[in-house]
Amino acid sequence: MMVLEFVIWGAWLPLIFSYLPTLGFSALQRTAILNAFPVAALVAMFFSNQFADRNFAAEKFLAFSQFVGGLAMVGLAFTRDFWTFFALMLLHCLLYVPTLSIVNSIAFANLKDSKDFGLIRMGGTIGWVLAAWPLYFILTDAASMRWIFLVSGVASLALAGFSLTLPHTPPKKAVTQEDKFAWVEAVRLLRQPFVLVLWVVTFVDAYVLNAYFNWAGMFLGSPQVGVATNRIMPIMSIGQVAEILTMAILGVTLKRLGWRLTMMLGIFGHVVRFTVFALFPKETWLIVLVFILHGICYAFFFAAVYIFVDEYFPKDVRSSAQGLFNVMILGLGVIAANTICPWMTDRYTAGGVTDFRSLFLIAAGVALAATAALGFFFHPPALKQSAQT
């Protein structure tokens, strides 16, 4: 289930930023299409997830969403009109994003020991990596990039069928008073300075991460680097392989370095990666090698944030706090990147050649500022035993 869930997403995301300009879409049109996913994420956080959780058996909702969303994704492969493309992408995202929580619910409801979830969730990272390799044999030129949607759509339809074989997971009818006022409770957490600082830095780092997704594939395929189209996805998947390994040492790293330094390393990884991209575009081996830093960037910051919230806040506000940070990680940070990056790409492109050096140095500067802000202003209090219970 997890493998297929993340093949769907991993097949199209890395290369859609390169594909949309080939359709002749303007920067504003590209922004609208790219923001369909984070808008759907915000809708899911405030409405879709709870609606699905309380009214439908999880496996049936998953089957319906992946079937309709899969058809929409297949349709994207044959669409060149902006409004049709935007409508199909929005439909897919509105149905797909809630399933990211639904698959977790199915897993937790049917595992005997919740500690086994880490192994199950690793299937998602493996699925993201696997999505890259079939495309190595398919993407022979720019015109063939529409296959990213076909691979995604087929995986979605396959998961729709497979969902019907999953254990029955009934809807959760009970709604507690805490659930009704979850977001009020979450906003109150921002009164604590260390939570506010981490929340703002999370927004900046989410922007930087998605700037990487906006530009990395385009950069690899540009004349400055010259990587063949079919090799872009496998090269970028190196980051997900590194993510698996980095997750394995995250616990030890947090114990030895602490929260602040571990998170600073996660953000500073972007500084190193963007600087290498900017200064050494002709050193292909170095460009490929530096993709390993994706594992550090993601695990040492975003995964650490989720663990920090789970460790630092009482049980009755943990879900609210996770949602508060997801607003930045999956919503506002992504919207900012997908709004600013297409505009910056057009501004720094002349004669068909993009000035990636300037783009990456700006991104490195933003990441460096976020690293410094975390270092100077993030001072969480000593963890008390009462905060864990």
Image (tube, grey):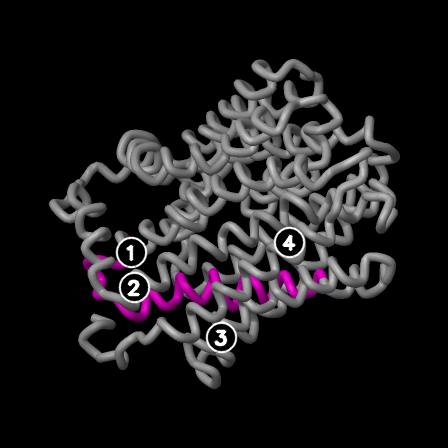
Report crowding for label 1: few under 14, some 14 to 19, many 20 or more residues within 10 A (C-alpha). Answer: many
Secondary-structure class at tag 4:
helix
Q: Position of residue 145 (x, y in %)?
A: 77, 31
Tell me the kind of residue under disc 2.
Val
* The label number, if any, that marks residue 126 in the structure image: 4
Secondary-structure class at tag 1:
helix
Which numbered disc, 4 or 3, marks the residue closer to the eye? 3
Please tell me in which quadrant of the rendered image residue 83 appears.
top right
Query: In the rendered view of the protein, which quadrant contains the N terminus?
Result: top right
Q: Position of residue 211 (x, y in %)?
A: 59, 48
Viewed as shown, does residue 378 lie left or right of 256?
A: left
Viewed as shown, does residue 113 lie left or right of 263?
A: left
Secondary-structure class at tag 3:
helix
| Segment tinted magenta in the rendering | 291-319
Which numbered disc, 2 or 4, marks the residue closer to the eye? 2
**Residue at (44, 67) in percent of width and height:** 304
Q: What is the residue that sits farthest to the bottom in this orientation?
A: 256
Report crowding for label 2: few under 14, some 14 to 19, many 20 or more residues within 10 A (C-alpha). Answer: some
What residue does disc 1 label? 321
Which numbered disc, 4 or 1, marks the residue closer to the eye? 1
Asked if residue 244 shows in the view, the reply is: no
Please tell me in which quadrant of the rendered image residue 361 appears.
bottom right
Q: CA distance from mark 1 to mark 2?
A: 10 Å
Question: Pointer 3 and pointer 1: residues touching (CB < 8 Å)?
Answer: no
* The label number, if any, that marks residue 262 in the structure image: 3
Q: CA distance from mark 2 to mark 4?
A: 32 Å
Tell me the kind of residue under disc 4.
Ile
Question: Pointer 1 and pointer 2: residues touching (CB < 8 Å)?
Answer: yes
Does 310 appear above or below 250?
Answer: above
**Residue at (47, 60) in percent of width and height:** 302
> Magenta span: helix, strand or loop, mainly?
helix
